Amino acid sequence: MEVEKIFIPVAISKGIKLFTSEDSFLSFFNSPYYAHKNITAIDLYPRYREFGKPALCPVSGKVIETRNIKTPHPSKFEKSGKESLIIIRSDENPKICIKILHLLGSAKKGDHVEIGDEIGNYIRSGFFSYWTDPHIHVEVRSIKDAIRTRGGFEIKPIINLGQADTIEELVNFNEVKGKIIAAKKDYLLIKIDKRLFCKRGFFGLKAMIRNQTGILDCGIPHFGFGGVFLKSTSSLVKGDIVRVWGIPVGRVSHILNHQNYILFEALPFKIRLETNLVKGLSLYLDLKDSNQIKIIPTEPKDIEWPSKKSIRIILE
């Protein structure tokens, strides 16, 4: 018997709440594209990380437009043949619509969809990098400006900061040990010490800015920027250094006091697995306490490790 999924709101824009299943993970900033750099998009990821599975609707409304779109031709993986764009007019505000990408759509123009309905299947988009997992890209827009790349409304996270988890603080260091839980040709998933994570509404890898502890949402250093969610940003200023395991990884570029998060420009640093140089860290906001990080090799198939192998991760 299939267990019914529970959907929870994780973001809001113009009064429209965006929902995802309680076992998902998500990102505002782990992407190189304009909408993510300007806080007008959110990516919603299923836990199972499998292309071809059903993509579930984040809102309720009427499908007013569907179309196939052209995507780039990536050099390092084979993309899916078709990609759909779906526009849904919000039930909450008929002047607002939701734009959804990175799926092969099954919802048709004129359909009414509810939160959690199947609207298509996840595809491997030509817009992806080789390490990108299946997800839907979601924007909230004016009904009069539904499709173009720019022009989306700011999307704000829905997080209950409350009392932050009490996590034993670790002294500064640049090396940790982890256990490989998934070894794919495009990336590794590694479980590391729980004390390196904390909860700021979502769960995520811990970062330090001055004496503030937050969680990271970013692809660094490769995308060149990212975000940190904190309990408070009141004592921070532009130029403050973002540190992971004591190593500088970014410099604060934008402080959003009303949302308790900051944006940062990535600083150059290197990541090694044992002695192997890798491309970067891919970090997300998780709805579960998974204690996982994604490591990206310099090329697909560049590093292949047996599952459950203990490994050192070194920042320098």
Image: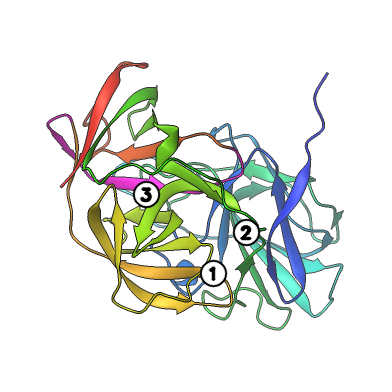
Taking the image as shown, residue 115 lies to the left or right of residue 223, namely right
- Classify 285 as above or below 142: above
Nearer the N terminus, badge 1 or badge 3?
Answer: 3
Residue at 60% across / 76% down in the picture? 154
Mark 2 residue type: Leu
Q: In the rendered structure, which amino acid carries the disc numbered 1?
A: Asn
Q: Is residue 238 above or below residue 160?
A: below
Magenta-drawn stretch contains 113: no
What residue did someone put label 2 on?
161
> Which residue is denoted by mark 1 in the rendering?
260
> Where is 312 relative to 19, above or below?
above
Q: Main secondary structure of the magenta part?
A: strand
Residue 127 is situated, as x and y percent measured from the top left of the image, at 43, 55
Name the residue nearer the viewer: 208 or 122.
208
Residue 129's label in the rendered image is 3
Task: Say what secondary structure mark 3 lies in.
Answer: loop
Disc tally is 3
Q: How far is disc 1 from disc 2 in space, using C-alphas?
A: 9 Å
Q: Position of residue 244 (x, y in %)?
A: 30, 51
Mark 1 surroundings: few (<14), some (14-19) or many (≥20) residues within 10 A: some
> Which stretch appears magenta?
274-288
Residue 127 can be seen, yes or no: no
Amino acid type assigned to the residue bearing label 3 in the image? Ser
On residue 133, the disc is none
**Residue occupying the far bottom of the picture:** 144
Name the residue at 54% across, 32% down: 50
Q: Residue at x 44, y 61 (%)?
A: 228
The answer to whether marks 3 and 2 mark residues whose Cβ atoms lie closer than 8 Å is no
For the residues bearing labels 1 and 2, Cβ distance under 8 angstroms: yes
* Marks 3 and 2, the one that precedes in the sequence: 3
Label 1 secondary element? loop
